[in-house]
């Protein structure tokens, strides 16, 4: 089978190496451009390399199919939460979160913005985390893609290969606007036709530069937008305000578990403001859902075709607690099995993010592994998941002013906006836990293929290379 992406990456690396020491100047030019255009996290430019992450049309097609299927299922679980006692019992959300999740957001498909973090191993996709509460990275990646495109010119590569990257920011703004329009259709007297948007996070967020990127994109789409903090909001019972100006649409970047009862939550409960993502999306963010997707008790939320895709793309996962469980054709004692099979498993907190608290069995001493099991089994606040080997690829790095090819671990982070696949970003790292907040790098995921039609390519390769979300 023809591998468009591998061929493109190889030629890109070869041509880049021919530039020699000139690569250091290109890197400096890109870094300066990114700093000027707000690709900054925690006061430093987000790390990158001199190459996007290339994926083939076939890989993009498989990711698209899986993402859209999973989002349909996740939306059903979110909508089932208020009336399904079994689901509420399993997730066991704190009372404040539970009360917010039960509030009707006023529009369909609560999972408006979702990032499904995964490993891409050849043509196989394995999902490891659903970032459904308040996922980040769209603004950064769109700008980074433009920066790489401007600075890196390799004529022989461009002559042989066609590449495409569809900006995600316009789709993000459309998704926010669509949710607002649906809510306004039922509450017309309370909400104006054209909203004023506030992007809201906690004070001292390290992501303020990306907030400026998003607000700029909203302004280009004709939506007046500002970024603000939860402490700067004021609700008088009729309207939510930021800096004295009315706010009708909130793009929520503050996580639900970081919120407290206050002006934002009061306005949301009263239906005086449209909030995206709504707190109800928090259901899909809980890692226990990985175990519940294949649980027979929730089979009414998953069709047979969806169950097949879940089995293909979601690794074996169980809630860490006492009792029996299935593993393939075996019935096992879950805690004994978890202890005895450390090197093939991963332990993860159900409600954390950013890789916090994750224990890889292959990197954890047995005594520490058993301590985690003993501490969390009774609480049932961890999951145990089958370990998926971390994929690695060669990426160009600048070391001492010279370009070097280095093996990096990477994951893909496809976005679904309004239930539709919108594109994906790639994160790279030298570490097993791959995260920008832990010092990892960020890259746009670019679909690439040979310009000439080749007999070995898959049906649909050309259509996918030009597909727009």
Image: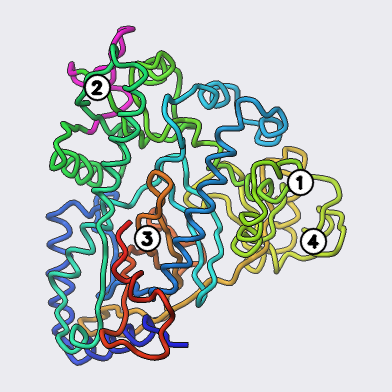
Q: Residue at horizontal 87%, vertical 54%? A: 333
Query: In what element is the residue under mark 2?
Result: strand
Question: Against 63, is 370 above or below?
Answer: above
Please tell me whether mark 4 or mark 1 is closer to you in this view.
1
10 magenta-colored: no
What residue would you read off at disc 1? 296
Q: Quadrant of residue 39?
A: bottom left
What residue would you read off at disc 2? 247
Query: In what element is the residue under mark 3?
Result: strand
Q: Residue at horizontal 55%, vertical 36%? A: 78
What residue would you read off at disc 4? 327
Closer to the camera in the image, 231 or 222: 222
Closer to the camera in the image, 166 or 351: 166
Which class describes the residues within 10 Å of circle 4: few (<14), some (14-19), or many (20+)? some
Rendering coords of residue 238 (x, y %): 30, 8
Cα separation between marks 2 and 3: 30 Å
Cα separation between marks 4 and 1: 15 Å
236 magenta-colored: yes
What residue would you read off at disc 3? 424
State which region is magenta.
Answer: 227-245
Rendering coords of residue 397 (x, y %): 29, 78
């Amino acid at each position: 089978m023809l591998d468009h992406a591998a061929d493109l990456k190889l030629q890109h690396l070869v041509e880049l190496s021919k530039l020699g020491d000139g690569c250091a100047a290109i890197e400096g030019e890109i870094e300066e451009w990114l700093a000027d255009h707000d690709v900054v996290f925690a006061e430093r430019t987000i790390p990158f390399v001199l190459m996007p992450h290339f994926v083939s049309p076939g890989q993009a097609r498989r990711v698209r199919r899986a993402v859209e299927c999973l989002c349909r299922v996740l939306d059903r679980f979110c909508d089932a939460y208020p009336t399904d006692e079994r689901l509420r019992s399993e997730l066991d959300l704190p009372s404040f979160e539970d009360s917010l999740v039960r509030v009707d957001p006023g529009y369909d498909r609560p999972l408006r913005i979702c990032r499904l973090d995964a490993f891409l191993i050849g043509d196989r996709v394995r999902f490891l985390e659903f970032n459904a509460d308040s996922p980040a990275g769209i603004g950064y990646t769109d700008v980074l893609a433009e920066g790489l495109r401007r600075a890196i010119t390799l004529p022989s590569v461009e002559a042989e290969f066609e590449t495409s990257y569809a900006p995600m920011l316009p789709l993000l703004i459309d998704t926010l606007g669509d949710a607002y329009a649906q809510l306004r259709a039922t509450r017309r007297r309370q909400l104006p036709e054209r909203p004023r948007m506030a992007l809201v996070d906690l004070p001292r967020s390290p992501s303020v530069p990306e907030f400026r990127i998003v607000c700029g994109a909203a302004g280009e789409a004709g939506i007046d937008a500002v970024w603000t903090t939860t402490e700067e909001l004021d609700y008088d019972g009729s309207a939510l305000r930021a800096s004295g100006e009315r706010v009708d649409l909130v793009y929520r970047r503050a996580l639900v578990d970081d919120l407290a009862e206050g002006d934002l939550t009061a306005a949301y409960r009263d239906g005086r403001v449209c909030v995206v993502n709504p707190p109800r999306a928090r259901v899909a963010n809980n890692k226990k859902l990985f175990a519940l997707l294949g649980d027979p008790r929730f089979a009414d939320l998953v069709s047979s075709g969806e169950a097949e895709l879940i089995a293909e793309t979601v690794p074996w996962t169980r809630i860490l607690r006492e009792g029996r469980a299935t593993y393939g054709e075996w019935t096992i004692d879950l805690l004994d099995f978890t202890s005895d099979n450390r090197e093939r498993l991963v332990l993860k907190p159900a409600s954390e993010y950013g890789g916090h608290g994750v224990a890889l069995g292959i990197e954890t001493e047995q005594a520490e592994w058993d301590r985690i099991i003993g501490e969390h089994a009774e609480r049932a606040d961890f999951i145990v998941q089958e370990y998926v080997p971390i994929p690695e690829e060669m990426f160009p790095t600048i070391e001492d002013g010279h370009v070097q090819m280095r093996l990096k671990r990477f994951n893909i982070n496809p976005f679904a906006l309004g239930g539709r696949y919108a594109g994906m970003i790639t994160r790279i790292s030298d570490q097993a836990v791959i995260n920008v907040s832990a010092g990892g790098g960020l890259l746009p995921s670019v679909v690439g293929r040979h310009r000439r039609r080749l007999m070995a390519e898959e049906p649909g390769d050309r259509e996918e290379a030009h597909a727009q979300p």
